[in-house]
Structure formats: C-alpha cells, structure tokens
Image (cartoon, rainbow, N blue to C red):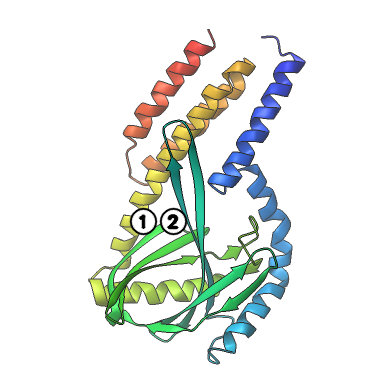
Amino acid sequence: MDITISGVVTLLIILVFLSALLARAYEVGPIIWLKRVLRRKRAQEGTDRRELVASVRQLLPQANDDTVVFSLHRESSASGGSKITVLSSTYYPRVFVVDGDSLWMIPMAYDKRRRHYELGEPVQFTADAVRQISLTGTRGKTLTVNFLLELDGRKRDIDMDLTPFCFRKNSFYPFDLMQETACDRALKVAENMARIACNLTPEELEAGRLKEECSQYGTYAACAGIFGVLLTPANNLPIVLACFAISLLLFGRMIAKKQIPKISAIVVLIEAVGAYLLMQ
C-alpha cells in the first residue's frame, strides 16, 4: 500500500483536529495528557494549594491542608438546530471543607481573565440534609459525589468533584494542586452520609458508579470507531485498525467490570463495516 506525502499531511491535519476537538469537548486526548505532565511539577510544589487553604482559613479557621477540597464541576450541553449544533460547557467552582461528620460548601467566583477568585459564604450540611446521593466519574482521576440536599426549605443538586490532581486544562481551571488526602476524607464523610440518610453502603454506591463509568467507555468506543471511519481517506489500514482496536480494548474494560456492551457494540460494528466499504 503506497503512502503519499499528501496522505500523510491529510492524516496529520485530521489528528491535530481530533486532538483539539477531544481537548475542547471531552477534556481528554494528547493535548490534555501533555498539560497533565507539564503541570504536575508545579502542583507538587504546592504554591496554589497553600494560597487556597490560607484563603479558606480566613472563613473557616478549623480548615487545613487535609480537609480543604477544591471542586470544579463541568456540565456540557448542546444547542442549535438540525444544521448547526453548538457544544458549550458550564463550570461550577466550589470549595468543600471536611468538618467532623459534616461538610462545608463554599461557592467560588472565578475571573478567568484576571485569574482572580473570591470565596462566598460557607454553608454547612450534615446527613440530615441529604435526600439522595450517588457516585459518578473515575477513581484516581475525578470522582463526583452527586448530592440532592434540602437546605433552608428548598432542594438543591450539588456536585462535589474529588480530583486528587487538579491542573489547568484550560482557562476555566484556576489551580495546579494536589489534594489526595483531602479527597479521601471527603469521600469517607460522603459515604457515611449515604449510609445514614439513604441506607446505601459503599459497595452499593460503587456498583452504581461502575454502571455509569462503563456507559462512558461505550461512548468512547463509538467515538474511536468514528475516528476510524474519518481516517479512511488516508488509505492507511494500520491506523484505521488501531482505532477499532481501541474500541475493542474499551469493550474489554467494560467486560472486566462485569458490564456487557450492547448498543455501543452494535454502533462500532456498523462503523467497522462502513470503514471497510470506504476503503474498497
């Protein structure tokens, strides 16, 4: 199979575009991985972490490095008509502080242009305020505790993102910091709240999280298949096969977690057939 210079250039352009798209829409991919490596050293130095804890202590003197958790929850949405679809993201920065069996929630206003933040008024809640609780996300990366709280007579959905290593993925992320110990303590408090308020064990919370995580693997597998189809114009069979190999690896992870791929497997199969026909 001949590989032309124009084919290589086309492939590189497609890969760069896909990397930028992944970084923008899903916060994954080579660009994000590179930022993670480059910013880890600054996070380990602890400058941002010390400044944040000092700011929190002005509001809650009992706070310390082991109890302060920075949480940045991201929600994506799509809007537009049948011809043009616009993807947008909304970021919710907050700080949580572990205080015995309770949590303090502190809203944060962040100006990404000036890289300046202000902390709002702390609100404390215990298991008595919890109506529902669940886990989503990935352990070791970002584990999200989803709270349904009843505070001051009204219900609120609050997401606490437990990210042991926070780094500036884009301009909406204000810090490079490590907070593994604080995240572990916050998770233990959340699990205790789930046990008291919802009669849920940590194992039951984890089972729900695994189901959600594997559904994301299915989505990524389908995306990898789409990339395989898009790369067929380069007429490079090994690269196309690599994309579908990624899909199979993701399916393997789902099966290892005792979750069987269904709809995503059908989608990837259709994509594989489409890629085969395009390369004929």
Q: Provide the secondary structure element on which disc 1 rests.
A: helix
Residue at position x 60%, y 45% from top? 23
Amino acid marked by disc 2: Gly
Amino acid marked by disc 1: Arg
Residue 209 vertical position relative to residue 234 in the rendered view, above or below: below
> Picture coordinates of residue 232 (x, y %)?
57, 18
Badge 2 or badge 1: first in the primary sequence: 2
> Picture coordinates of residue 97 (x, y %)?
49, 80
Towards the viewer: 134 or 206: 134
Q: CA distance from mark 2 to mark 1?
A: 7 Å
Residue 115 vertical position relative to residue 101 in the rendered view, above or below: above
Residue 35 vertical position relative to residue 106 in the rendered view, above or below: above
Task: Specify the quadrant that holds the N terminus.
Answer: top right
What is the crowding at mark 2: few (fewer than 14 residues within 10 Å), some, or many (at least 20)? Answer: some
On the question of residue 252 being in view, the answer is: no
Residue at position x 55%, y 24% from top? 230
Quarter of the figure with residue 43: bottom right
Residue linked to disc 1: 209
